Image (tube, rainbow, N blue to C red):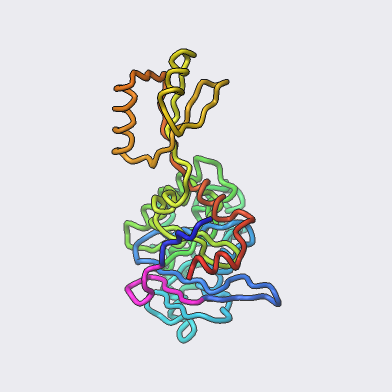
Amino acid sequence: MPSSVMPMPSAQSSAAIAASGLRKSYGDKTVLDGIDLHIPAGSVFALLGPNGAGKTTVVKILSTLVTPDDGQVRIAGHDLAADPQAVRAAIGVTGQFSAVDGLITGEENMWLMADLHHLPRTEGRRAAAELLDRFDLADAARKPASTYSGGMKRRLDIAMTLMGSPRIIFLDEPTTGLDPRSRHTMWQIIRELVTTGVTVFLTTQYLEEADQLADRIAVLHHGAIAAHGTPEQLKRMIPGGHVRLRFTDPAAYRHATHTLHDTTRNDDALTLHIPSDGTPHHLRTLLDHLHTTGIEADEITLHTPDLDDVFLALTHPANQPDQQKEDVR
C-alpha cells in the first residue's frame, strides 16, 4: 500500500476531541502506538478497524475508563489527565453491550440515569418523558425493558446516555445485531443528534454505516492510524475505478476490443473494463470517444472504489506495523 495517508489537522485548533501521541499496552502487547485524533465539534467521526485493532480501547481511554500509558488528550476543552471529572460531565457513552436493566421499565431506567446525574426529581421526570417521546418509546415506557426488541433497547440505551445533555457522545458499535430497519432508524437518530451541535464518536464494523454518517473517518490497524480523511478522500486513495462496457453482439464486442486500448477483457461475458477515475471529465471524454469510433455498448456502468475496498487494502496482512507507522509520520 503506497504512502498516501492524509495528515491529521493540528490538534491545537478548536476541537471537541484532540489527542496526540496516544499509547496503550497490556503487558508486552502494544494496543495503541502513538495515535493522533482531531474531531471538530458538531461532527460525526468514525473509527474503523478489524477486530482487535484497538477501537474499544480508544473509546475507553477517551471516556476516562482506562488510563493511557502516554499521550495528551483534551475533550470539550478539558485536559483528560488533569480534570477527568469535567470530561465525564461533558460526555455520554453507549457501549457495545446494552446498559439497559431489563428488570425495570424503560421509564424507570431513565429515572435511574436522572438520579445518577443528580437531577432534581421534577427536572429528571420531565427530561425522561421528553427523551422517551423523542425516541418513540413513550407507549412502551411503563413496560419491562426485557420485553423490548433489540432496536427499542438500543434507542433506550442512547436516550439514557442523553439524560445528562452531553456535548460529546461515544457510540461503540451501536447497531451491531440490529435488523436493517432498526439500523436505519439509528442512523436517523445520529443525524438528528448532530444537528443539535452534539459531537458523535462512532466505532462500527459496518462500512456502509461510516460512509452514510461520518464527516471524517480514521482506519486503525496494528495500533496506528493507517489513513484518515473524508469518505471521498479515502476512496480516492485506492486504485481500481473503471467503466464497464457490456455487449450482446459479438461483432460489436470485437470492434470495441480492436478499437479501445488499455482495457481488461472478458470474452465469455462480452465485457470490457476501462480504467477510470470516475470524474465527469473522464466520463465525457470516454463517451465522446465511443460515439466517434462507433462503439455501441448495450450497458455502461461505472465502478468506483468504496469503503470496503479501502478497508481491505489498508488492513491487508501485508501492511505490517512498521510500514504503517512510517506512513503515518
Q: Position of residue 296 (x, y in %)?
A: 37, 18
Residue 40 seen in the figure: yes
Q: Which residue is at the front of the view, 75 or 272? A: 272
Q: In the rendered view, would you say 20 is above or below 181?
A: below
Q: Position of residue 228 (x, y in %)?
A: 44, 61
The image quadrant of residue 51 is: bottom right
Q: Which residue is at the front of the view, 94 or 16? A: 16
Assign the magenta stretch its main secondary structure.
loop
Magenta-colored span = 8-21
How many marks the image carries: the answer is 0
In the drawing, does residue 103 fall left or right of residue 263?
right
Q: Position of residue 11 (x, y in %)?
A: 38, 74
The image quadrant of residue 57 is: bottom right
In magenta stretch: residue 83: no
In magenta stretch: residue 18: yes
Q: Which residue is at the front of the view, 229 or 191? A: 229
The image quadrant of residue 320 is: bottom right
Q: Which residue is at the front of the view, 44 or 181? A: 44
Q: In the rendered view, would you say 237 is above or below 8?
A: above
In the picture as drawn, the residue positioned furthest to the right comes out as 27
Residue 108 seen in the figure: no
In the drawing, does residue 197 fall left or right of residue 114?
left
Q: Position of residue 73 (x, y in %)?
A: 46, 78
**Residue at the location (64% across, 76% down)?**
25
**Residue at the location (50% across, 72% down)?**
62
**Residue at the location (47% across, 49% down)?**
238
Q: In the rendered view, would you say 243 is above or below 117?
A: above
In the drawing, does residue 183 fall left or right of residue 144?
left
